[in-house]
Amino acid sequence: MTRIVYVNGRYLPYGQAAVHVEDRGFQFADSVYEVCEVKNGALIDEERHATRLQRSLKELGIPSPATSWTIGHIMRQCIVRNRVRNGVVYLQVTRGEAPRDFAFPSGDVAPTFVCLARSTNQSKTEALAAAGIAVKTLPELRWGRCDIKTVMLLPACLAKEAARAAGAREAWFVDAEGFVTEGASSNAWIVDAEGKLITRTLGRELLPGVTRATLLDLIGRDHLAVEERAFTVAEAHGAREAFTTSASATVMPVVKIDDMLIGDGKPGAFTMRLRSSFHQVAKVSGR
Ligand code: PDD
């Protein structure tokens, strides 16, 4: 339950927290966001999330609503005020409110800044990881700057809904050449027959996931074989193991892609090892 939400300088009861009807985030999805994991009351990989937020803002020419230090302070306040021990912090920055016009508003418009923290059901996530998830592949239908974490998430919602209707939990987008770009809300990984990890190289067609970056640190630490390159749907169907990465679920095993079971249809041992080691390398911020 979220009780208190930060909106533009004030901590408000959930039911009273609101933004203006002519907020550009509402009208144009002119807005960016971050989702950061909370574990034992502390933020995980705060610096990487802060850096990506500033990059997203810069790419769109939205002024930062505060310094990274202040944003960190607000995130921690939301965690404490909502008594979150394990969960996520969601923060969103829009270009602000102005009479509806496609071009940016002239003059000084203050960005809208919203932050909320929420507990997640750990046992449900663990049960999901123990069973593994199914994935449905779908044609890529998003825009050309998926490297910016914008709230322009309608294609992701449509894809997730199509996945859900097919009994899957995540959708993997596939580009025009038949290569997987990423999940609707996660990065995509496979393990090939030789045990090599494969995930797509960063570019404008996918989000530079914080969990992806931290997992690469773990892979480097343990000298594991990894190749950053695009992989096809056929390679994914024939993979020994597969998984997704995201702040809200860290390393999540994939046991089925479309109609194909991955490995023996159970979470891979390698994937589960990565999952259990992840927090050895992820940075924990002080409370
Ligand atoms: N989703 N790709 C997309 C399209 C995403 O939306 C996300 C995150 C990721 C993984 O990024 P990270 O490891 O930094 O969480 C990749 C978040 C969790 C969400 O929208 O809820």
Image: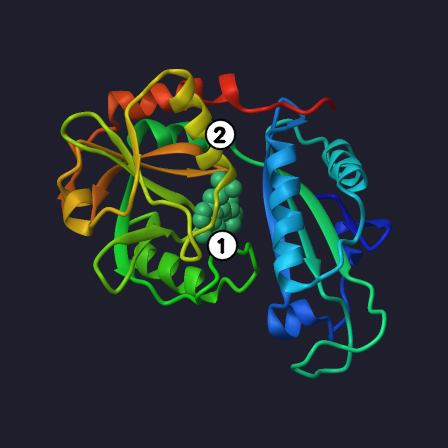
Name the residue located 62 percent from the left edge and 51 percent from the top edge.
Answer: 55
Q: Amino acid at mark 1?
A: Asp
Label 2 Cα crowd, 10 Å radius (few <14 / some 14-19 / many 20+) = many
Percent across and percent down for residue 85 are 65, 27
Mark found first going from the N terminus, 2 or 1: 1
The vertical placement of 114 against 274, above or below, is below
Q: Is residue 266 left or right of residue 107?
A: left
The secondary element bearing badge 2 is classed as helix
Q: Amino acid at mark 2?
A: Thr
The vertical placement of 66 against 177, above or below, is above
Ligand 1 within 8 Å of the CB at mark 2: yes
Out of 29 and 83, give the one closest to the viewer.
29
Q: Quadrant of the N terminus?
A: top right
How far apart, in angstroms, are the residues tagged by discs 2 and 1?
17 Å
Asked where in the image residue 32 lies, by quadrant, the reply is bottom right
> Which residue position is annotated with label 1?
147
Label 1 Cα crowd, 10 Å radius (few <14 / some 14-19 / many 20+) = some
Residue 45 visible in this rendered orientation of the protein: yes
Q: Is residue 265 left or right of residue 153?
A: left
The vertical placement of 259 against 36, above or below, is below
Percent across and percent down for residue 111 are 77, 62
Asked where in the image residue 138 lies, by quadrant, the reply is bottom left
Percent across and percent down for residue 106 are 80, 78
Residue 258 visible in this rendered orientation of the protein: no
Out of 205 and 75, give the one closest to the viewer.
205
Q: Is residue 272 left or right of residue 74?
A: left
The secondary element bearing badge 1 is classed as loop
Name the residue located 47 percent from the left edge and 34 percent from the top edge.
Answer: 213
> Which residue position is annotated with label 2?
214
Asked where in the image residue 164 lies, by quadrant, the reply is bottom left
Out of 71 and 67, give the one closest to the viewer.
67
